[in-house]
Image: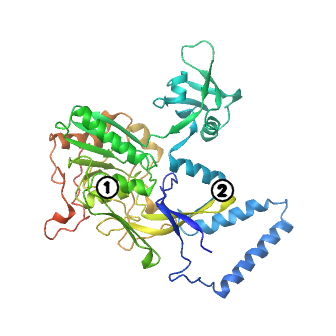
Amino acid sequence: MNRKAKFLVAGSLIGATAVIGVAQIPLLAGGAANAAAPDTYRQLNLFGEIFERIRADYVEVPEESVLIEAAINGMLSALDPHSAYMAPDAYSDQQVEIRGAFGGLGLEVTMEDGTVRVVTPMDDSPAGRAGVMTGDLIVEIDGESLQGLSLDQSVEKMRGPVNTPVRLTVIREGADLPLYITVVRDVIRLQSVRYRAEGDDIGYMRISSFTEQTIDGLNRAVERLTAEIGPGNVKGFILDLRNNPGGLLDQAIGATDAFLERGEVMSTRGRYPEQTQRFSARPGDLTNGAPIIVLINGGSASASEIVAGALQDHLRATVLGTRSFGKGSVQTIIPLGPNGAMRLTTARYYTPSGRSIQAVGIVPDIEVIQELPEELRNLGIEARGEASLRGHLGNEDGEATGSLAYVPPNPANDVQLQYALSLLRGTEVNENFRPGTTSAAQLPAGQTPGAPAPTSPVPN
């Protein structure tokens, strides 16, 4: 009996997963079961013999469930870096990432010297309304100290059923005594899209990951930025996909479609020819053909590479930055009932021109290198990509390592962003900059869609 499964792409950097639909997985092309070779059954007997010997003779009584889970993990990890078993808790956390919504307080927090510090309350969040402020230190939740807990463990205590109260003990700079703030949990929607006007002429949009909220967030960002700047005053948009590890594939396709009038967005090709799927854009460009610059770096992986690659192939946007991560495979989430789920690589994806970015990445049209600040140069930070992962799927056209994934916190020090702004304003000139909409069908004779023009390094 076939098991229901969900197809996805998975972000290589943080393991984010992406659902694009529900389908039956064929056991074999044509529907027939694939019979195992006789040697396979001998190997399974060997596994059973070793398992029984461990149970009987190991120096301490082993936890059998731990042994089985380790064996499953070993089997899947032997395939490639992205196939894995997800225990029930991990599967549940992954579903939260996919939905982009959960019951919680609405705080962005970080760990500082073993203490949870508030980075910022989210807009119109329960915590913000209750009086939690940026810079507050949260030392207790419902009277239980957070000392010694990890950031993930602390965050887990803040999440919970909607309409349930949480009592925070907060230390605030300038206050003589701890503050006790009661917050009632509500539905929190993660902001995958953040945006702002750069001056009075350019819209900036950053997609941190592709969740169920991304397309709505992108539509809202373009609409509000256009209204704020003025429809006749917009010189272009910057779509920042740096350090975006991936997410929901249907949202990545929708985000690409938002800027295209027609044409293929991407395709997936599995083990069997009948598993090939193609996804195309529908008429309607949110920006009415305004110039677009897409920012990428070594932290741009998976679904973000789909967006950058499609807009590049259609000559709809100028891709600027450094080579992306190179995660070009598709995974399938196979639920295992109360036992969690299995994530299995089932296909590669291809850009509209038919190129696979697996272990290669997206090469920007204009290469702009963001150097590490001096205080980070001696920490051994290296450029990494899919090609540097042990056991990765290969690419018959060759492989290449990604690039550094550093983005300065201060936009004024962000040379990639600043160069993009200069291009859109016309104060910098680069022959590889595409100032407006051009269909892939209108490529000059002899030019292959998707073949990036030679890069032009920019002095920093």
- Residue furthest bottom in the image: 38
Q: Amino acid at mark 2?
A: Ala
x and y, in percent, of residue 340 in the image: 65, 58
Q: Image point 24% across, 55% down: which residue?
A: 365
Q: Residue furthest top?
A: 176
Give the residue type at disc 1. Asp
**Residue 343 position by quadrant:** bottom right
Color encoding of the figure: rainbow
Q: Quadrant of residue 303?
A: bottom left
- Horizontal and vertical percent position of residue 332: 52, 64
Residue for point 36% across, 58% down = 306
Write the residue at 44% across / 53% down. 246
Residue occupied by mark 1: 257
| Percent of width and height locating residue 93 | 59, 49
Task: Report helix, strand or loop for mark 2.
Answer: loop
Mark 2 → mark 1, Cα distance in angstroms: 35 Å
Around disc 2, counting alpha carbons within 10 Å, would you say few (fewer than 14), some (14 to 19), or many (20 or more)? some
Q: Which residue is mark 2?
A: 87
